[in-house]
Amino acid sequence: MRCLRCGLCCKDTKMELSNNDIRRIVKLGYNPRGFLVIRDGIPYLRNINGYCYFHDKDSRRCRIYRYRPLGCRVYPVIYIQDVDFTIDKLCPMHYTVSIDELIRKSLILMNLIKRIEKERIIRLRYVYYNFYNKHSILEN
Ligand code: SF4
């Protein structure tokens, strides 16, 4: 596909992150407390002033482009819950995504979604385990 670097996909991002994404970004020296937020066990890229934490407004570029999350790499291919994999029409260059690219990126996205869900369950179990463990210690 072709990209205009319009930055629309970096606006109010709801991009989910896998543990691999987080590890890769942390290795660059970024603190996860800065660039991510966790909601219901899922890490998301944080927004600052309405844009992704890593979006550089002046250059309209991603500051970690080579290391960006997998979900950003497959964009504008997205998954709409209970519908299907599709191309996000919000992207002005959506029409430049070929069928081959749509199929290839849909497969990558499908695996990514499964991985993030697995990691979410493990993360929540860990949180609940620690909570109940601490609670039972307090009761004794
Ligand atoms: S919305 Fe599309 S054209 Fe604009 S920066 Fe994102 S991928 Fe590129």
Image (cartoon, grey):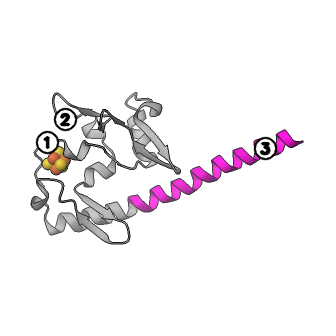
Other residues around mark 3 within 10 Å, as few (<14) / some (14–19) / many (≥20): few
The 10 Å Cα crowd at callout 1, few under 14, some 14 to 19, many 20 or more, is: few
Where is residue 119? Give x, y as percent: 52, 54
Q: Image point 57% across, 57% down: which residue?
A: 121
User: Disc 3 designates what residue?
Assistant: 135
- Proximity of marks 1 and 2: CB atoms separated by less than 8 Å: yes
Q: Look at mark 2 in the image and give the residue it sits on.
A: 61
Q: Amino acid at mark 2?
A: Arg
CA–CA distance between discs 3 and 2? 46 Å
Number of other residues with Cα within 10 Å of mark 2, as a class: few under 14, some 14 to 19, many 20 or more: some
Does mark 1 have its CB less than 8 Å from ligand 1? yes
Tag in front: 1 or 3: 3
**Residue located 49% across and 59% down the image:** 117
Q: Which residues are magenta?
A: 112-140
Left or right: 133 with respect to 118?
Answer: right
Q: Amino acid at mark 3?
A: His
Work out which quarter of the rendered image holds the N terminus and state it: bottom left
Q: Nearer the viewer, residue 117 or 21?
A: 117
Q: Is residue 66 magenta?
A: no
Magenta span: chief secondary structure: helix
Residue on which the image places disc 1: 5
The answer to whether residue 140 is seen in the rendering is yes
> Along the polypeptide, which appears first: circle 1 or circle 2?
1
Tell me the element at label 2: strand
Residue 80 image position (x, y, % from top left): 32, 65
Residue toward you, 132 or 20: 132
Element type at mark 3: helix
State how far apart marks 1 and 3 are (Cα): 50 Å
Is residue 130 inside the magenta stretch?
yes
